[in-house]
Amino acid sequence: MHWSNFIAIFFGGAFFSNTIPHLVNGVSGSPFQSPFAKPPGKGLSSSTVNVLWGFFNLLLTWLLLFRVASFDLRNSCQFLAAAAGALVMSLISARGFGRFHGGNTPTGKSE
């Protein structure tokens, strides 16, 4: 498999990870940060915007994994590339969203 497929798989995993917080908050009816809020990434967007943003991320996941690359979940190298993308995006999200929800300190309180 060509190295560019692994890049697509890595970013497919990252977009999949970004799908989760937006869909969970959107479906539960909670406002949540999104790129469309004012200020972007800091303000809150409606639950509807978050559902749409989550599904857009899911569409990008599908495109990268199954249209750009031929992702096979049983292929260890491909699975690890997707998992690495998901892990990196999850850590970035935890740091970014944690600033607003008290998740960046050992006590859970905002600094």
Image (spheres, grey):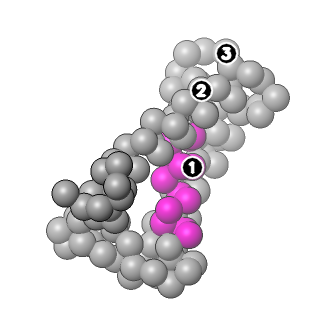
Residue 51 vs 72, above or below: the answer is: below
- Residue 29 seen in this snapshot: yes
> Pointer 2: residues within 10 angstroms few (<14), some, or many (20+)?
many
> Pointer 1: residues within 10 angstroms few (<14), some, or many (20+)?
many
Residue ID for mark 2: 81
Q: Is residue 3 left or right of residue 90?
A: right
Residue ID for mark 1: 16
Q: Quadrant of residue 5?
A: top right
Q: Marks 1 and 3, how far apart in space?
A: 22 Å
Q: Amino acid at mark 2?
A: Ala
Name which residue lies at 35% across and 49% down.
Answer: 106
| Disc 2 secondary structure class | helix
Q: Main secondary structure of the magenta part?
A: helix
> Pointer 3: residues within 10 angstroms few (<14), some, or many (20+)?
few
- Residue 97 seen in this snapshot: no
| Disc 3 secondary structure class | loop
Q: Nearer the viewer, mark 2 or mark 3?
A: 2
User: In which quadrant will I find the N terminus?
Assistant: top right
Dot 2 or dot 3, earlier in sequence:
3
Q: Amino acid at mark 1?
A: Phe
Name which residue lies at 42% across and 42% down.
Answer: 91
Dot 2 or dot 1, earlier in sequence:
1
Residue ID for mark 3: 1
Magenta stretch, residue numbers: 12-24
Q: Point out the residue furthest to the front here.
A: 107
Dot 1 or dot 3, earlier in sequence:
3
Mark 2 and 3 residues: CB-CB less than 8 Å, in contact?
no
Name which residue lies at 25% across and 61% down.
Answer: 110
Q: Position of residue 72 (x, y in %)?
A: 77, 31
